[in-house]
Amino acid sequence: MGRPREFDVDEALETAMELFWRKGYEGTSLTDLTEGMGITKPSLYGVFGNKEGLFLKALERYERTKMNFFHEALKEPRARDVAEKILRGFADSQTAETGPSGCLGINGALACSEAAAEIQKCLIENRHRGERDLGKRFERAAKEGDLPSGHEPFDLARYIMTISQGTAIQAASGADRPALYRVIDMALQFWPVPAVQNS
């Protein structure tokens, strides 16, 4: 029988995710990680490869556990409901009692040196992928008559994602959930409504 692992990989990854979320990629040192995860540097390298590999696994976990609301929201029948569920889902995640404030993707990418260019590129591509998925959903809404003509679906997707990034920065600065919800309510007042729904 092989030698048993000296730590629980799942728990260690959860801890690493929260550290990266709280401090950003470059703000989180190897010492922060090994002490927080309760492991040695050789164990970290042996299981995750290096700090970058660990971050990518932590990001994957974040997407799977904290961001699952996003793709669920895309299934909503009306475009406005999609937008609202996404914005409120982001706000809920950004102000959850059990985790750091803000957003791992935003916190991780705001300050990156050239040494972390690949991590920054990965985080930016992640955001762009979400924006594209949302744009495609709004494109479908336009074809179904759920958006009035003259409103570019991918511009609307960028609008929603820009609001969500703004609430992430607000949350990281101490704004609470009710404050973010009020911002979302104001943002949604400008949502384009088809003429049929106005009558």
Image (spheres, rainbow, N blue to C red):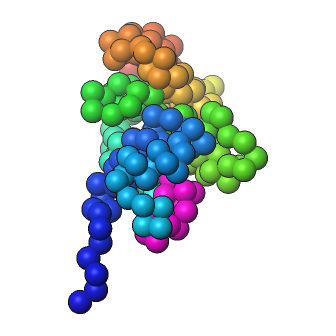
Camera-side residue of 50 and 80? 50
Q: Quadrant of residue 155?
A: top right
Residue found 32% across the figure and 12% down from its top: 178
Residue at 27 percent across and 62 percent down: it is: 8
- Residue 8 position (above or below residue 61): below
Residue 143 visible to an observer of this rendering: no
Q: Please state if 127 lies on the left or on the right of 57 as rendered.
A: right
Residue farthest toward the right in the current orientation of the protein: 114
Q: Position of residue 56 (x, y in %)?
A: 51, 56
Q: How many marks?
A: 0
| Residue 145: x %, y % from top left | 47, 33
At 53% from the left and 28% from the top, the residue drawn is 165
Q: Is residue 49 magenta?
A: yes
**Foreground: 89 or 194?**
89
Outermost residue to the bottom: 1
Percent x, y of residue 154: 60, 36
Residue 158, picture quadrant:
top right
Q: Residue at x 34, y 17 (%)?
A: 177
Position in image of residue 131 (x %, y %)? 56, 40
**Magenta region:** 44-56
Foreground residue among 199 and 59: 59
Quarter of the figure with the N terminus: bottom left
Decide if residue 107 is in sight here: yes
For residue 1, above or below residue 35: below
34 vs 38, left or right, is right
Q: Quadrant of the C terminus?
A: top left
The stretch drawn in magenta includes residue 160:
no
Instruction: Give the prevailing secondary structure in the magenta stretch.
Output: helix
Nearest the eye: 137 or 113: 113
